[in-house]
Amino acid sequence: MPGSSQLLGPTTHERNDLKIVSEHVNRYNLCSKGDYYIARAEIEGRSPSQKDGIDSSKEYELRKSYCTFLKDLGGKLRMPHIVIATSTVFSHRFFLHQSHCKNDRFTIATACMFLAGKVEEARRTLEDVVLVSYCLQNKDNPMASQEFKETEVCERQKELVLLAEHMVLVTLDFELKVRHPHSFVLLAASELKISCQGLVPVSYIILNDVLYTTLCLQFRPQHIAVSALLLAAKLLKFKFPVKNWWKRFCVTRHQLDGRWLELNFRSHFFILLCM
């Protein structure tokens, strides 16, 4: 699975922050209609890339390639996983409105990583980000690092990334708030006093793979978290100790009865399993 090679698991810092997470959940009205999410059919129907002649399977491959690139880039920069996740969401949001035909995905992804580092308070210098990005894109060239040190190459690459960062900011309308589902998984596990030790790690594996999909554009993070926990529980044959626990995350009975969220989630997950 694409995300499984770098397992995102709960850290000691995250566990100590559960109280803060709880306050965060209470501060936001999770049932509000304020956030804008889009149905999968609409995402595919309005795709600028498909309007420019790229079919859905090719667009999927392009999405997969920049997600993998971001994972590798973040790893080499020793970025916290939240920066990789945020940069991936930024990239998904960008290509929801912009075409792959008119924008180099690796340049945009590099700009999203640089921007996410600032947003998540894990800054790396522009030159470091651009150097690692350049070497990754030219990994078959053993002289890539040396070439980058040439003034013209270095300055040109930095200018491209800064221009791309500006395009990302304008395209996202300077809306840089990203809430990830991982904190909601930890919160649920803590509140429900879940005894199954494997539930959170398996949920995190699922969430890592979800980064390769457009689910972050379709559903609220707490809904994705609930779906990850439900799917992990089924895989582990675990029964939750509290009935209707998902109501705390504003997931309704109708949504569960209709299975629309979980089925959509499963369709993405099993596609990833078969890759």
Image (cartoon, rainbow, N blue to C red):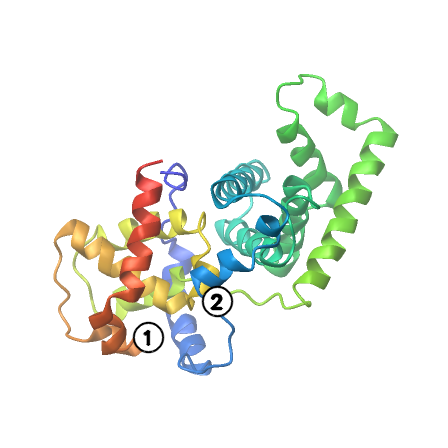
Q: Residues within 10 Å of mark 1 (few under 14, many from 20)?
A: some
Using the image as rendered, state which of residue 146 and residue 18 is in the foreground.
146
Image quarter where the C terminus lies is: top left
Question: Residue placed at 47% from the left, 41% from the top?
Answer: 57
Image quarter where the N terminus lies is: top left
Q: Position of residue 209 (x, y in %)?
A: 39, 47
Using the image as rendered, state which of residue 224 and residue 113 is in the foreground.
224
Q: Amino acid at mark 2?
A: Ile
| Tally of marks | 2
Q: Position of residue 10 (x, y in %)?
A: 36, 54
Badge 2 marks a residue whose secondary structure is loop
Using the image as rendered, state which of residue 8 and residue 169 is in the foreground.
169
Question: In the figure, residue 146 lies in which quadrant?
Answer: top right
Q: Give the numbered dot on residue 249.
A: 1
Question: In the figure, residue 17 lies in which quadrant?
Answer: bottom left
Give the answer, above or below, for where 234 lies relative to 222.
Answer: above
Badge 1 marks a residue whose secondary structure is helix
Mark in front: 2 vs 1: 2
Q: Give the numbered dot on residue 209.
A: none
Give the answer, above or below, for where 139 lies relative to 99.
Answer: above
CA separation in Å, label 2 and label 1: 19 Å
Q: Is residue 148 left or right of residue 39?
A: right
Q: Is residue 12 left or right of residue 253?
A: right
Question: Residue placed at 41% from the left, 66% from the top?
Answer: 221
Question: In the figure, residue 243 lies in which quadrant?
Answer: bottom left
Give the answer, above or below, for where 169 lies relative to 245.
Answer: above
Q: Position of residue 97 (x, y in %)?
A: 63, 59
Question: Residue placed at 32% from the left, 75% from the top?
Answer: 249
Q: Amino acid at mark 1?
A: Phe
Give the answer, above or below, for where 180 lies relative to 146.
Answer: below
Q: Position of residue 265 (x, y in %)?
A: 32, 57
What residue does disc 2 label?
A: 38
